[in-house]
Image (cartoon, rainbow, N blue to C red):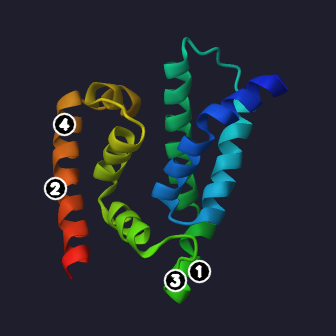
Amino acid sequence: MRSESEVNSAIERYSDMVLRLCMVHLKNSADAEDVFQNVFLKYTLCPTCFESEEHEKAWFIRVTINACKDLLKSFFHSRTITMEELTGYAPEATPDQFAVMEALWSLPKQYRDVIYLHYYEGYTAPEIAGILNRNPNTIYTHLTRGKELLKELIGGVQNG
């Protein structure tokens, strides 16, 4: 089990990234906060000694994505809808932010992950390939196609 200072330091370094990843995958803040807590609990209990800060960051990304997938596959989650879906209103987002996030959420999963890791976290394609256990050329292809889809979706929102 990790010390309180280690956990607090990790929360300072990775909390924004973990929460953003959760929001990209789960599309609502309540589920994102639940997964956020679970990820840091796993970190607290994880016996792994990380080789570097990059190794630790990659661990957080992988664990967060897996936790989001697990939640999305759960029976409870498949039988619920969000308040945003029910009301058509997302109070914490401005119209422009909502349009961009809506476009990102609507991308196929393979593009959403690489777009997020590249543009929000600053990873290169070879680094993303290592994190997601994929071929670097596949990552380049997904970045190109995802960016094109995102441009079409955002362009359609702005022009429509």
Task: Using the rendered image of the protein, determine whether residue 1 is visible from the camera's viewpoint.
Answer: no
Locate the N terminus by quadrant. top right
In front of the other: label 3 or label 1?
Answer: 3
Pointer 1 residue: 83
Tell me which numbered mark, 3 or 4, is placed earlier along the sequence: 3
Q: Position of residue 14 (x, y in %)?
A: 60, 36
Determine crowd level at label 3: few under 14, some 14-19, many 20+ residues with C-alpha closer than 10 A.
few
Amino acid marked by disc 1? Met
Q: Label 2 to label 1, Cα distance in Å?
A: 30 Å
Tell me the residue at 54%/88% (across/down): 87
Q: Which mark is residue 148?
A: 2
Q: Label 2 to label 3, Cα distance in Å?
A: 27 Å
Amino acid marked by disc 4? Tyr
Amino acid marked by disc 3? Tyr
Pointer 4 residue: 140
Q: Position of residue 5 (x, y in %)?
A: 80, 24
Tell me which numbered mark, 2 or 3, is placed earlier along the sequence: 3
